[in-house]
């Protein structure tokens, strides 16, 4: 009798286990389902074909990849606006645009989420000032998370505030700055935060930064929005927000600015 009860109990456990496994399999999320392909499965969808871009020189910007959203056409700031509303009032020169001191920050009219961003910038030559008062600007991902722009060539400031720092959070792994007046590049891979319907943080933002071809931020977890002498917590935000550039009263120049939106497999 006892054996029969034990056998029946074992059968019940096995039945429950198989039921749970079946339910788990049938309710797999798209994120989990993308791992169900067999190795070398020829039916697996192919990635889209694009034309890659070309590299820039000091004299001439390169071409963006064919699937990029070009944020500056080299002629005007029609894709940008003041963060206070109305047109972007920064100066536009021959193939570049420049901070107009005291005109205020500008942002893209289009909102972006997870992305690959390419942006080129140069600080004034000859240089003026020192520390933070030297070619200062910033690239704000989703309006909130700043990658510092600064003339850090033979110029010392606090480590988490120099060029390519996640401002106030992470110093760059190396100072790869070029001399003032020369064009510098940021290639940034950004994955924004995620929140549940109740506003709880499910995943922080992550960023990777390559400065002039050198890896300087290696998939670091951003602690929250950028602030001066503060580290405020996350607050619920949409998955897509504009890219913002900072007016820090220095005539920093930008050119060859484009962005590629990133999507998870299956989206």
Image (cartoon, helix red, strand yellow):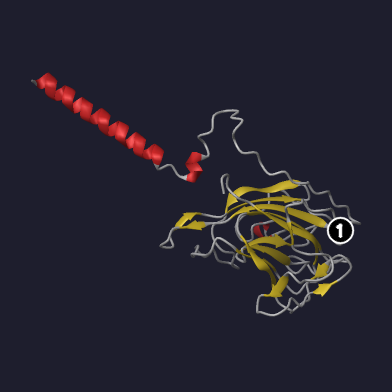
- Residue 81 in percent (x, y) is at 70, 74
- Residue 223 in percent (x, y) is at 54, 57
Q: Quadrant of residue 83?
A: bottom right
Is residue 82 depicted above or below 122 in this figure? Answer: below
Front-most of residues 119 and 124 = 119
Name the residue located 57 percent from the left edge and 28 percent from the top edge.
Answer: 39
Is residue 58 depicted above or below 131 in this figure? Answer: above
Q: Quadrant of residue 48?
A: top right
- In the picture, measured across the screen, residue 137 lies left or right of residue 218, that is right
Residue under label 1: 182
- In the picture, measured across the screen, residue 250 lies left or right of residue 243, that is right
Quadrant placement of the N terminus: top left
In this view, the residue farthest toward the front is: 43
Name the residue located 72 percent from the left edge and 71 percent from the top edge.
Answer: 80
- Residue 259 in percent (x, y) is at 71, 57
- Residue 11 in percent (x, y) is at 22, 26
């Amino acid at each position: 009798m006892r054996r029969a009860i034990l056998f029946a109990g074992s059968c019940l456990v096995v039945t429950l286990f198989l039921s749970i496994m079946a339910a788990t399999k049938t309710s797999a999320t798209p994120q989990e389902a993308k791992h169900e392909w067999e190795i070398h499965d020829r039916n697996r969808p192919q990635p889209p074909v694009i034309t890659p871009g070309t590299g820039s020189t000091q004299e001439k910007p390169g071409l963006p990849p064919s699937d990029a959203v070009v944020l500056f056409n080299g002629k005007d700031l029609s894709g940008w606006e003041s963060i206070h509303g109305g047109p972007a009032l920064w100066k536009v020169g021959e193939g570049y645009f420049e901070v107009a001191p005291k005109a205020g920050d500008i942002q893209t009219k289009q909102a972006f989420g997870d992305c690959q961003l390419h942006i080129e910038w140069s600080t004034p030559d000859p240089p003026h000032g020192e520390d933070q008062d030297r070619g200062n600007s910033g690239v704000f991902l989703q309006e909130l998370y700043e990658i510092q722009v600064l003339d850090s060539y033979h110029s010392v400031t606090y480590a988490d505030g120099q060029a390519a720092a996640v401002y106030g959070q992470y110093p760059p792994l190396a100072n790869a700055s070029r001399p003032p007046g020369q064009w510098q590049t940021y290639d940034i891979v950004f994955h924004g935060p995620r929140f549940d319907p109740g506003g709880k943080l499910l995943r922080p933002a992550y960023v990777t930064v390559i400065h002039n071809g050198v890896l300087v931020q290696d998939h670091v977890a951003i602690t929250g929005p950028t602030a001066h002498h503060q580290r405020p917590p996350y607050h619920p935000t949409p998955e897509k927000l504009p890219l913002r550039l900072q007016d820090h009263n220095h005539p920093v120049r930008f050119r060859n600015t484009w962005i590629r939106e990133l999507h998870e497999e299956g989206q």
